[in-house]
Amino acid sequence: MLDHADHTQTATVPTMTTHRPRMNQPHLWLALIAGLLTLPGALARPELDAAIQAQLVEAVTAAVELDAYHARCRSDGSGRRTENLNKLIVSKLRLTILSVQDDFFPERSYRRTQERLERDFIEQLQAVGGCAGAKTSPLPDTLRQRYDTALEAIRRLP
């Protein structure tokens, strides 16, 4: 209100009362705790059977090897196949390539998995005579077919 005599303003401030839940209602607390305990399970990704895990391992291996070939022998370091696979499994299974490498590869570590995959690919490449030999061998086609087959298998998953 505005007081005309001394031109000061006074206001009425509403008082707030806080409401505290009653501690004597244990059934409500138990229901709340039970609901919170089930939340992580509801948000977690679904369990994947051994066959799907094997398909994921095959797809990641195929993508990494094809990208390694393109990076080493064709000067294409884009990682396109790995990125495409990653987008697919994220949208389909809520997994990333790194989580597949951590959870489903025998090393149980994406860093050790990546190191081994690189070593394995270098051995394959050396076996056909390096990049020059690979270009005249069936290796690039084999890598491409393996990748395409693995990617299609992931696309067909429910």
Image: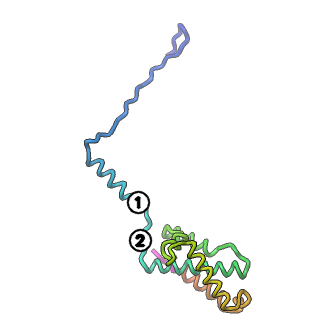
Q: Is residue 5 left or right of residue 158?
A: right
In this view of the protein, which residue sits in the foreground, 91 or 139?
Answer: 139
Point out the residue furthest to the top here.
Answer: 5
Tell me residue 91's x, y (percent).
52, 68
Which residue is found at the position 39% from the left and 58% from the top? 39
Q: Amino acid at mark 1?
A: Pro
Tell me residue 17's x, y (percent).
37, 30
- Disc 2: CA contacts within 10 A as few (<14), some (14-19) or many (>=20): few
Q: Is residue 26 magenta?
A: no
Which residue is found at the position 54% from the left and 9% from the top? 6
Instruction: Tell me where the magenta segment starts and ends, as one range.
Output: 153-158
- Disc 1: CA contacts within 10 A as few (<14), some (14-19) or many (>=20): few
Q: Is residue 156 left or right of residue 118?
A: left
Q: Quadrant of residue 110?
A: bottom right
Question: From this viewpoint, is residue 110 visible?
Answer: yes
Residue behind mark 1:
40
Which residue is found at the position 26% from the left and 47% from the top? 26
Q: Is residue 155 magenta?
A: yes
The disc label shown at residue 51, or none: none
Vertical comparison of 65 with 86: above or below: below
- What SS does tag 2 mark? loop
Q: Is residue 101 left or right of residue 34?
A: right
Q: Amino acid at mark 2?
A: Glu
Residue behind mark 2:
47
Measure how far apart labels 1 and 2 are at the Cα level.
13 Å
Question: From this viewpoint, is residue 155 visible?
Answer: no
